[in-house]
Image (cartoon, rainbow, N blue to C red):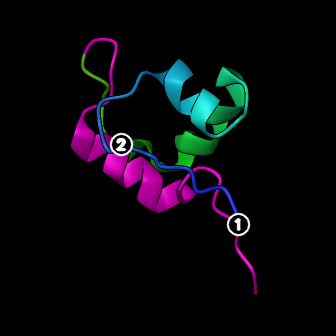
Amino acid sequence: MKVNTVYLKPYSLSELSRLYDVCVRTMRKWMEPFEKEIGVKRGRYYTISQVKIIFEKLGLPGEIEVE
């Protein structure tokens, strides 16, 4: 079984979309409902605290939910 590691660090929107294996447009749509909580991106990257919120709201990349 292969284990993927996701690091909590500043990410750009394109880097986040690659982590979640979706296009940038889809990533923006997924993040849209949480814009107020995530806050405004400063420069090119989301801060570590913003990335943490994104991971909490969208789940970790590659994580599978089983009911």
Up the image or down, 44 lies above or below 30; here it is above
Residue 44 lies left or right of residue 2; in this view the side is left
Which quarter of the figure is the N terminus placed in? bottom right
Q: Nearer the viewer, residue 46 or 28?
A: 46
Amino acid of disc 1? Ile
Location of residue 5 in the rendering, given as x and y in whole percent from the top left corner: 47, 49
Residue sitting at 70 percent across and 73 percent down? 65
> Mark 2 — residue?
51
Sequence-wise, the earlier of marks 2 and 1 is: 2
Location of residue 34 in the rendering, given as x and y in whole percent from the top left corner: 46, 49
Q: Residue furthest front?
A: 1
Residue sitting at 42 percent across and 21 percent down? 12
CA gap, disc 2 and disc 1: 19 Å
Mark 2 residue crowding within 10 angstroms, few (<14) / some (14–19) / many (20+)? many
> Mark 1 — residue?
64
SS assignment at label 1: loop
* Label number found at residue 7: none
SS assignment at label 2: helix
Up the image or down, 43 lies above or below 11; here it is above
Residue sitting at 51 percent across and 24 percent down? 15
Stretch in magenta: 43-67
Question: Visible in this render: residue 28?
Answer: no
- Is there a contact, CB below 8 Å, between mark 2 and mark 1? no
Residue 66 highlighted magenta (yes or no): yes
Location of residue 36 in the rendering, given as x and y in whole percent from the top left corner: 36, 45
Q: Nearer the viewer, residue 53 or 4?
A: 4
Location of residue 67 in the rendering, given as x and y in whole percent from the top left corner: 76, 87
Question: Visible in this render: residue 24?
Answer: yes
